[in-house]
Amino acid sequence: MDKKVTVVGAGNVGATAAQRLAEKELCDVVLIDILDGVPQGKALDLTEAAPIEKHDAHLTGANTYEASKDSDIVIITAGIARKPGMSRDDLISTNAGIINDVTKQIVAYSPEAILIIVSNPLDAMCHVAFDASGFPKNRVVGMAGVLDSARFRAFISMELNVSVESIHAFVLGGHGDTMVPLPRFSTVAGIPITELIPQDRIDALVDRTANGGAEIVSLLKTGSAYYAPASAAVEMAESILKDKKKILPCAAYLQGEYGIQDLFIGVPVKLGSKGIEDIIEISLTDTEKAALMNSAAAVQDLKDDLKKLG
Ligand SMILES: NC(=O)c1ccc[n+]([C@@H]2O[C@H](COP(=O)([O-])OP(=O)(O)OC[C@H]3O[C@@H](n4cnc5c(N)ncnc54)[C@H](O)[C@@H]3O)[C@@H](O)[C@H]2O)c1
């Protein structure tokens, strides 16, 4: 392959993302983890599946960063995931140290890479990676909105019994309980769901979307969601690798857009070979704007917590 993606963290999300990248033949993949043998074993296992899955992507596993040299994209999934009863924000002190350390090592070998951050709490970890990398803001992007809107789309599909392919959904804000699903921009074949689903049912779907991560955590009991998160990160990587310029909801560093200053938060962006090539601003109703500001305040609190951690 002429493109190379490193996935840091060979756990549930990282290994599944590696599998999807390889099976879509998007790039060669390097898996990195601190656990001795785990990234090597998973890369070899995926390599042995290649003849059956019919792809020629090369997969390598490593515990150090030399193999990641000159990656086009680095997807960071390293860290701990939440368990029942934990919020994403409970992970902040452990994961901030890990993301800081991982980012510095990545930058040393791939100074031109685009970073896709997955580790939680997502918006705060984007700040850690942004600061540790010194990269321009177009090359640090967080994965949350693609997952949250995929969940919303899945629930709309179940509600209406129509193909997921006909459904687009729109989620703004931080990746947490304050996320802002926007029903009037969520459509079935171009028809807003507000025309198709009664308000009380829309409210229920919005609520299920905002709590979508916790629903999976409470079912799995030993970890958090990974199939859909991996799919979401790979959709972002594909748009960058193929310069598709898809408009996707991602955590981006805002400097005045939506009236928000110096904060990573989920907004629609254009993702292409340069990373975030544009931030799309739409006009919001007063209620939507208030919900976005509430979400931004929650992200700002996390950013302030990071400062206290030093
Ligand atoms: N943004 C999102 O929407 C979203 C969705 C799902 C999961 N997540 C987050 O992604 C992260 C990973 O989730 P998971 O389910 O794959 O967890 P996991 O426990 O299965 O995998 C995490 C891996 O990171 C590794 N790791 C820890 N410290 C490391 C370091 N310093 N360097 C390299 N590797 C290191 C661990 O050994 C482990 O293999 C969690 O923080 C989780 O909350 C985010």
Image: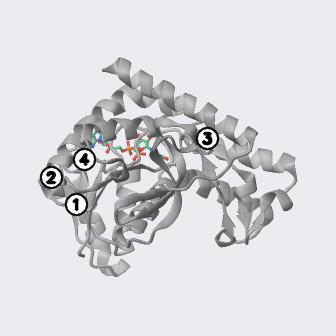
Q: Is residue 189 above or below residue 289?
A: below
- Identify which residue, 285 or 203, lies in the foreground: 285
Q: Residue at x 26, y 70 (%)?
A: 3
Image coordinates of residue 302 in percent, x first then y, are: 47, 27
70 or 119: nearer the eye? 70
Pointer 1: residues within 10 angstroms few (<14), some, or many (20+)? many
Q: Are marks 2 and 1 in contact (CB under 8 Å)?
A: yes
Query: In the image, what residue occupies the spot 38% across and 73% down?
Result: 242
**Residue annotated with mark 2:** 109
Q: CA distance from mark 4 to mark 1?
A: 16 Å
Reading the chain from its start, which is encountered first: label 1 or label 3? Answer: 1
Q: Reading the chain from its start, which is encountered first: label 2 or label 4?
A: 4
In the rendering, at what x and y percent does residue 36 appear? 19, 46
**Cβ atoms under marks 2 and 3 closer than 8 Å:** no
How far apart are the two marked residues, 4 and 3, measured between alpha carbons? 30 Å
Type of the residue with mark 4: Asp
* Marks 2 and 3, the one that precedes in the sequence: 2
- Label 3 sits on what residue type? Met
Q: Position of residue 172 (x, y in %)?
A: 60, 47
Mark 1 secondary-structure assignment: loop
> What amino acid is found at the position of numbered circle 1 in the picture?
Ser
Which residue was labeled with disc 3? 179
Residue position marked by numbered label 1 in the rendering = 71
Element at badge 3? loop
- The numbered dot on residue 33 is 4
Q: CA distance from mark 1 to mark 3?
A: 31 Å
Q: Using the numbered discs, state the Cα–Cα distance from disc 2 to disc 1 in whole angstroms.
A: 8 Å
Which is closer to the viewer, label 2 or label 4?
2
| Rendering colour mode | one colour
- Mark 4 or 3 closer to N-term? 4
Residue 192 in sight here: yes
State which mark lies toward you, 4 or 3.
3
